[in-house]
Amino acid sequence: MSKLDQEDRNAISARQFAFPKQRKEPLEDASHVRNAIARFDQVKDVTDHERDEAWARIRAAAKKFDVALDESDWRELGAGKKGKH
């Protein structure tokens, strides 16, 4: 994954983040999409509604960048691994 410095991150439109209000989890390429999926549960101080919207953006980006996504809902993330969902 290409590392974004603060200047690059600031140049990205809010629409290109999974969580645009918080500017968390950029969706610039396939690597960033995979990272957004992996770190989804680590995003703090967001509502379930914001997570639903972020998941829709992630799904669209995954399709655009041909990233396999087994889960249909963010609530399925880690279901078998952590037992908390």
Image (cartoon, grey):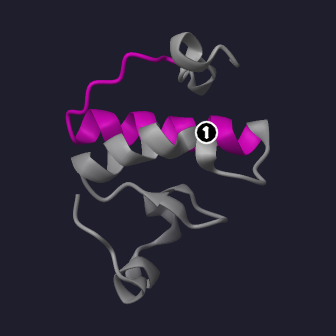
Q: Tell me where residue 57 appears, x and y as whole percent.
A: 48, 43
Say left or right for 72 vs 52.
left
Going by the picture, which residue comes out furthest to the bottom? Answer: 7
Residue 80 horizontal/vertical position (percent): 53, 10
Q: At x 39% / y 89%, what residue is drawn?
A: 7
Which quadrant would the N terminus be assigned to in this image?
Answer: bottom left
- Looking at this view, is 41 or 13 the one in front? 41
Residue at figure coordinates x 75%, y 39% from the top left: 49
Q: Position of residue 60 (x, y in %)?
A: 39, 38
Tell whether position 56 is magenta: yes
Q: Mark 1 points at which residue?
A: 41
Instruction: Identify the main secondary structure in magenta.
Output: helix
Magenta span of residues = 49-72
Q: Is residue 75 magenta?
A: no
* Residue 78 figure quarter: top right
The outermost residue toward the front is 82
Q: Residue at x 64, y 50 (%)?
A: 43
| Relative height, residue 4 to residue 21 (above, below) | below
User: Which residue occupies the foreground of this view, 75 or 42?
Assistant: 42
What is the three-letter code of the residue carrying label 1? Asp
Secondary structure of the residue carrying numbered label 1: helix
